[in-house]
Image: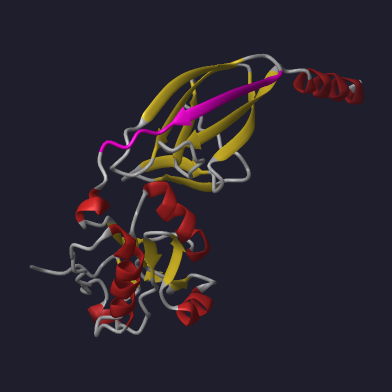
Amino acid sequence: MRLHNLVLLFAVISASPAATLSVTMVDPAGKPVPARVYLTGTDGKAWFPSSSVIYERKSAYCSERHFVPPSGAFEIVLPFGRYRLEVERGKEYLPAVEEIDVPAEGVLRRTVRLARWIDMSRAGWYSADMHLHRRLRDVGVLMDSEDLNVAFPITRWRGGNRAVSEDPDLPAFLRKGAVAPAPHRAFTVLNEGFPTALAGRAKVRVERDRVERHEAKDHLLHLTRRAEHADVRAAVRDDREITQR
């Protein structure tokens, strides 16, 4: 009897109405681009396609659940029902929001056309993230998804009295130096040679110069390489060490 009930339960689950949602995100030129995606059901549950870079964190201080499809497109099988799709790509693009009704079967295709409202790099200003805790292997696609020009990933960190954690790819990226994952984007790893007492007090000053658009990539690489050789080489942060000003 128990085996019979299990078979029936499996049959019911297998027969649950579901369809494939296929989404492509494109820039104003129609090119697929990575972006930050929030996909949520009416019950508040967040959904993630397996082929994406997933960020899911919930604590007493924050709750964030999103994913980034590296190719600019994703597919996911969803149960029949209504979902909210939100797509963001940094501060220079308008967010796109859509309510989607997933059918009981088949494939539902959507194209999200992202609209840029300003292009600061044309005026010689570059966006940057100076405090980035993400896997080094994902930094390139994450920069693209946030439309970031410069990033300085923190590669070693300590929480409370726990041992220092380190990105497993740190040695390889230290050998690479400055990395340009795409045109007009560059990042470098700040070496981890700081004593604990100085952790959290490092500052890297990134100069902002007006440059012609065709010079932007070389200029960004120049800035990141300068950071590599700066006197400040921090990549260790201790959550108890806060600079007093």
Quarter of the figure with residue 62: top left
Q: Position of residue 145 (x, y in %)?
A: 43, 47
The answer to whether 158 appears left or right of 17 in the picture is left
Tell whether position 87 is magenta.
no
The answer to whether 197 appears left or right of 22 in the picture is left
The answer to which of 225 and 82 lies nearer the viewer is 225
Q: Residue at x 45, y 42 (%)?
A: 35
Q: Position of residue 20 (x, y in %)?
A: 66, 26
The answer to whether 151 appears left or right of 72 in the picture is left
Q: Residue at x 37, y 68 (%)?
A: 154
Q: Residue furthest left?
A: 245
Q: Residue at x 23, y 63 (%)?
A: 211
Instruction: Give the vertical position of 39 relative to 156 (above or below).
Output: above
Q: Position of residue 121 (x, y in %)?
A: 26, 53
Residue range highlighted in magenta? 106-117
Q: Residue at x 63, y 43 (%)?
A: 50
**Quick check: can you spot residue 237?**
no
The answer to whether 198 appears left or right of 54 in the picture is left
State which quarter of the image contains the C terminus. Answer: bottom left
Instruction: Give the vertical position of 70 relative to 2 (above or below).
Output: below
State which quarter of the image contains the N terminus. Answer: top right
Quarter of the figure with residue 234: bottom left
Instruction: Give the vertical position of 21 relative to 68 (above or below).
Output: above
